[in-house]
Image (cartoon, coloured by chain):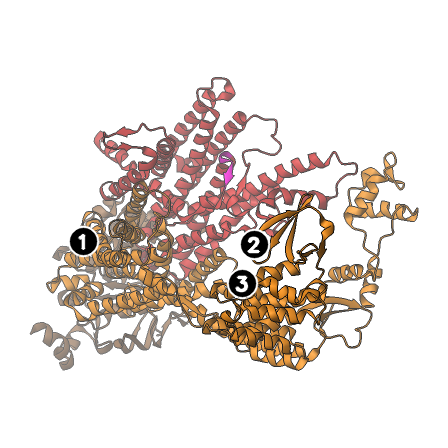
Amino acid sequence: MLRMLSLALMLCLMVPTTAAAQTLQDILQTHQDEVLKPGRRSVGVVLDDLVASGLPQALPFLEAWRDREIVQLGSDGLFYRAAEDGDAITLTDLDTGEVFTQVDDADLTETRPNGGVRRAIGDALVQFQLSDPDIAKRRTAVDAIARTMDASQRAPLIGSIDGETDPVLKEIKTRLAGMLGALFAETADARIVAINDLSGDLSVDVRGVLNTILATDAQVAATVPDGANVAQVLVVGTDLTPTEAYARLVVAELAPPLVTKSQIRDALVTNINGDEVGGIPVASLDTDAGRALAYDMLAGEGIAPPRVNETAQADAIAAHTFYLQYAEPNPAITDAARTALTDIETKVAMSQAVDLGLDALSLASIYFLAAIGLAITFGVMGVINMAHGEFIMMGAYTGFVVQQFVPDYTLSIIIALPLAFAITFGAGVTMERLVIRHLYHRPLETLLATFGISIALQQLAKNIFGTQARPLTSPEWLDGALVFNDVIAISYIRIAIFVLALIFLTLILFVLKRTRLGLEVRAVTQNPGMAASMGINPDRINMLTFGLGSGIAGIAGVAIGLYAKVTSEMGADYIVQSFMTVVVGGVGNVWGTLAGASLIGFLQKGIEWLNPSNTLAAQTYMILFIILFIQFRPKGIVALKGRAAAD
Amino acid sequence: MRKSFLAENPSVLWFIAVLAVFTVVVTLLSEVTGVGLISTSFVKTLGKTLCLCLVAIAMDVVWGYCGILSLGHFAFFGIGGYAIGMWLMYARTEGIVIESLAGQPIPPTSAEVSDAIGNQIFGVVGSSEFPWIWAFADNLFLQLLMVVLVPGLLALVFGWLAFRSRVTGVYLSILTQAMTLALALYLFQNDSGLRGNNGLSGLQNIPGFENTSQAVISVIFFIASALALAAGYIFFAWIVSGKMGSVVKGIRDNEARVRFLGYHVESYKLFIFTATAVVAGIAGALYYPQAGIINPGEIAPIASIYLAVWVAIGGRGRLYGAVIGAAFVSLLSSWFTGGGAPDINLGFYVVQWTDWWLVLLGLSFVAVTLFFPKGIGGLFDLLVRKQS
Amino acid sequence: MSMLLEVSGVTVTFDGFRAINNLSINFAKSELRAIIGPNGAGKTTFMDIVTGKTKPDEGTVIWGDRNVSLLGMSESQIAREGIGRKFQKPTVFEAQTVRQNLAMALKTPRGPFAVLMHKKTKPNAERIEAVADQIGLLDSLTRVAGELSHGQKQWLEIGMLLAQEPRLMLVDEPAAGMTPEEREKTTDILKEAAKTRAVVVVEHDMEFVRRLDCKVTVLHEGAVLAEGSLDHVTSNQTVIDVYLGRAHA
């Protein structure tokens, strides 16, 4: 330990000029005996000098030395690196790299470093890499240590921390040293200190270290031996099934193995005698009971090992204790690790809850954006627009097309947003004028007619853009994620969508509550007849409302396209969720849509969290929940009250 | 009673007569009689079309007569297909497994047989255990009962929930669509017990008829489909005529008024919803052995919407309209998408119907809704009016 | 004599607006009653409560000899109890014939399976024809209801009420849009019906009410303002102030 530290000290004080005149060979010649027959003690001198020399060729030499490739040539007494090449042996000059062939292997003396020496060389190697002037090499070395987590790496790692110039890497080294300390520090107390130091860290590798300390073996014995660090005594029936328990007894050679069904079958097949086995006709072997009977006959004759019956199994299980034993014998250490892990897991769970909440929030924003246009048209006009999803798709493709002409992603998004609004606004107004206007008061027909438009638009998009997904690249400043800690992270795109949703919420509320158009829209929503008699032109309002709803769908399309793929079918993916959002939230109310989007977003994330492996199931359960929800609040979360709603 | 019903509804007799003639002609021209003018695959297409006509009249009753635009009836159709498909797949695999195990030196136990069948059927989704929903798959009778019971019970429960809370109009449509989506998503999972998106396949091989040619089987199913369509037509015509029809149409036109007349509207809706779901299930059970494969994609909400499209184009509120719509649009659809229609060369662009058929269908559907709300069936009214 | 329908202390609020305010009103087993009142007096809401369309916040509605509460019942149950309603706007099933309309209303079992198995019988046909005769539509039995004139539709709806054989008929503005001759006939039909049951007529038209020649209840702001003969209530100063006064102003 002390030597290592002094070595490290020398490394950081290394001044290349002091050793410039020296060659590697010079150093080796100085310590000829130590190089040729290194001992665990004597090798230190060589290593110290090598490190002190600062020679770049020292590193490959150490590797070769460790790998027993260094030889001494009898004729000149110099050391070379040797490699067998068929019958011939090639020697490489350690300083110049010059290669020549030596045929007579009798003239060569191999260096034979033993295990302890090789370990010492290995440590020195790590030391070299950890203190390499090239930061990339230092990083590689640290990464390698993090991957292998070996006890031998601890000392060199600690040795290199003080000399580390890069603050980030220093931080990483310190953390890694802490983890290695938890695993491999010399004394139990030192390990416990290191373990306690880890407890604030939520990262996966720290949890991995603690789990390694807490690794258990399944054991079985007649009684738990004294001094065993037992993690848990297993109860047969609750913690493990009798079958598993017996299997463990068999593995531990504490009980005879069971005769499996296939063994019974094989024994019967090999012992068929005419059309009988053990005196039982073959035809009656089509049940397990029949086979058991025949097998028992065979066993009785001593041809096959006897079956272990249920009672014997139960007795064997009852006579033993099944327990989990820590690989780490010191209970103080495992206790500390358990406390630290519990602590970390609590923090991780809390962080995960926050992360889940953020995820749900961004999902809710997306649903809000996708549904708000639909909510406006549905609420104001009572029109179900099945082509709403296709307007979302149109918006996304608008973004894609703009990016084909404007290579700057930031600029192209700035152009695409209003353009998508304009295009889908136009499409919406056109659809309202040509189709929906003629179908007012026939909501089911409107639903079907807009569905016709939806399939036509979808197929049209397929014909124009093809079936494969088109990319909509987000600007660079939206790449990456806002990282709070090892668990909580939210991508900038999702934040942007959240902000966009907020902007639209404000904008729509402003338009509805503070402008003349909004006043007229609300008037038409509440009582179209009365509104018309007061000089409001419902025709114009309907047209504008429909345009507005469609336009927002277009913008939602650009936003969705940024984080999901743009395909001709993307609209269909969102349409049912959008309907759900509107229906759950309550028709004709912006806050209702917000509530609906939040409920559905949080619900979906919540269900996915409960059943993370299966998003399909999550969606299934969510829809079932919504169907039930509608039972209890048919008018949605934010229901309009009074006579207007009753009709 | 039956006599007076048919006498009052001559169109039913006409329909049965046309269907009978059609069935006989197709049978005579099929490969079974040696004439072979109609290929086996086309007989299957026609048989499948008859099943689609059957589910279309069910849709017409629930939507055209009762005013419930259900976007879930094709799901019931699919459930019927799955129910019969389970037996078909199980029984056929069982036959193959027993045959392959027969060569063993000692006879297999039932557990070995069932393991082997499970491996064959569920190996594709990485499992070999039989899910509980396959409990009756080995029994044709019980599984046929499932064809009727599962869609019926699902419709009963869903309808009871929805009608009880007075969900109507577009809300109800969206809710049925959600139900359909939930079902499709559920079936898409590998652990749904129905082989995920692989679906059930090999359904054209009917256990017990291994030595019968597909030509004969196709004609048998064609005739069975025709009989089912005839029976369904008479059944629904009977329901929608007479007093039941009056009440049901009354619910469509003014639900509240019917309620104030003392009728428990929810029960009527539930009856119609469930009865049509059951018929849809039966239609599916006849369809999928002719199609040979069923997968969750068939159940997706879009299929149910197409069903509504057929009925609307054919003319809703009249049973023969639904038949015409389903037959016309589905046959036209397979003609266009199957490459049967010639491409149109515009010089600068070649219109390929495989690409453009859906655009045409979508737009013509809008046109029908706008300009011919009575659909093709409405043309009959014009003819009748001209004659009188 | 016990009452057929006793409404007492009923209050209904829509978004803070009291449509019915502590209303109490009773009807005898066979009587003709007119309810009048200005717009927004709560006439239609009162009918909604009795027929189960609207649930009141407070109060009781007691029905019939068995004194059952109507509040927990659905619309169809209440209708089967014997309360028939005619809407302000004629709502007949326009796609169906007059005979089908009447047949649907005819007092027969209402369950789906009974209806499915329903057979046409001679007595039922005779009842339909009798009602049709009463409302003057005997010649129009095979006509589609949508083709009828406005007045005929009103009659058909009254006929459907009669076919229901209710013990209480709630009739909302039966004379709206009718010619004077048609009104006279309507008056006769209602008077005739009131001989065997309670008939409650909501009406704006004073002339029509006068011709009914019956007890009148005046509703105002969701409560009973006055009750008695038409002459009695029209001479009531409060009534003149809130209703007639305003109407004649």
Whether residue C109 is visible: no
Which chain did the image draw in orange? Answer: A
Label 2, secondary structure: give it: loop
The mark lying in front, picked from 2 and 1, is 2
Q: Is residue A149 left or right of residue A276?
A: left
Q: Is residue C210 above or below residue A77?
A: below
Label 2 to label 1: alpha-carbon separation:
117 Å
Whether the residues at callouts 2 and 1 have beta carbons within 8 Å, the answer is: no
Using the image, tell me which numbered label, if any, was put on residue C234. Answer: none
Q: Quadrant of the C terminus of chain B?
A: top left
**Residue closer to the observer: A334 or A42:** A42
Q: Position of residue A605 (x, y in %)?
A: 45, 64
Instruction: Identify the residue at image location x=47%, y=28%.
Output: B41
Residue under numbered circle 3: A56
Q: Chain of mark 2?
A: A
Q: Is residue A340 above or below residue A463?
A: below
**Residue closer to the observer: B15 or A347:** A347
Colour used to depict chain C in the structure image: brown
Colour used to depict chain B in the structure image: red
Residue under numbered circle 1: C151
Q: Amino acid at mark 3?
A: Pro
Label 2 to label 3: alpha-carbon separation:
12 Å
Q: Magenta stretch?
A: B290-294
**Residue closer to the observer: A172 or A613:** A172
Q: Position of residue A209 (x, y in %)?
A: 60, 70
Residue under numbered circle 2: A97
Label 3, secondary structure: give it: loop
